[in-house]
Image (tube, rainbow, N blue to C red):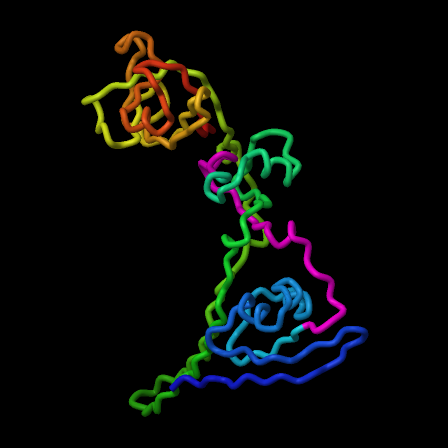
Amino acid sequence: MLTLFSQTLMAQVVGDDAFKIYTVVKGDTYFKIAKKFNCSVEDIQKANGNKTIIKIGEQIKIPVKGVAKPKVEDSNIKSHAVVKGETLSKIAAKYETTADKIRKLNGLKSDQLKIGQVLKIPVKPETLIIHEATEEKPTEKKDTVAKSPKPVVTPKPREAADVNPGMPEKAAKPTNADFVVEKEEVANAKVLSKKMEDTRTHVMHPTIPKGNIIVVVNPASGRMAYCKVVDNYTPKQYGGSGLIITPAVADKIGLSGTSESVKIKYAAP
């Protein structure tokens, strides 16, 4: 049977700062607790040694005064570890921001990234992940009957799950194959129907391997689309065109004709 802990509050003064002692209950998160006591998540974490995990039954300090309010820019920043195949454009699209903002925030002088490199990402407040408190379950002990000379091993109590394991302490040393860069080229895009699925954002390119995801940008409209390369060809097959796109891609980036100049961005080792 699970045991729920009741909520208790006690006033306590430590140095120049005053705190309330609060016992975590089921369903609590840092966000819920901060909202309940009209303070910030960062203030609570700082008061408790920057802990990122809370457990049911745990007693934590709630700051009452003397704790500075967090900067807005600090509370809206998330860490991201680069994985193989990622570029600044892909990471920016994932967090609904721009590559330029990520570049400025991290002081990057180029778009070259390393696998395992940790970047600061500016995110919207509503996209921040809030972890819920974990519930500790009592270990069930079973009566054992000696049926053999083998010793009886008592299992260790299971620890509550770590809901936020965090980043590895040390990333593996990168090799030359771990570096990825974002390449960009200008191509004459030709809209071709019936060769591919018209309703899918598919493209054909002379050299980019099949299965890769590329970004196609229409400079005239400023609109872009993520597209999958489904086949390769020689430019002579289509009158020297550098990219063949479906009607769905043309509609998404706002091409008005059947053959226009576009920009292509993709990751390459």
Residue 7, image x, y percentages: 55, 83
Quadrant containing the N terminus is: bottom left
Q: Judge whether residue 145 is colored magenta.
A: no
When the figure is inspected, residue 88 is found, relative to residue 172, above or below; the finding is: above
User: What residue lies at 46% left-to-right and 26% top-to-bottom?
Assistant: 222
- Percent x, y for residue 232? 29, 20
- Quarter of the image for residue 17 reads bottom right
Where is residue 242 shown, x and y percent of the image? Answer: 36, 15
Relative vertical location of residue 95 with respect to residue 9 in this rendering, above or below: above
Give the camera-side residue of 172 and 255.
Answer: 255
Viewer-proximal residue, 52 or 93?
Answer: 93
Q: Position of residue 140 (x, y in %)?
A: 39, 85
Residue at left 52%, top 55%? 128
Q: What number of labels is visible?
A: 0
* Residue at the limit of the structure toward the right, as seen here: 16
Q: Is residue 77 shown in magenta? A: yes
- Identify the magenta region: 63-90
- Is residue 227 found left or right of 269 in the rendered image? left
Q: Residue at x 45, y 76 (%)?
A: 158
Foreground residue, 172 or 264?
264
Horizontal relation, residue 198 to residue 263: left or right: left
Please report the residue visible at 50 percent of the width from the left and 32 percent of the height from the top.
180
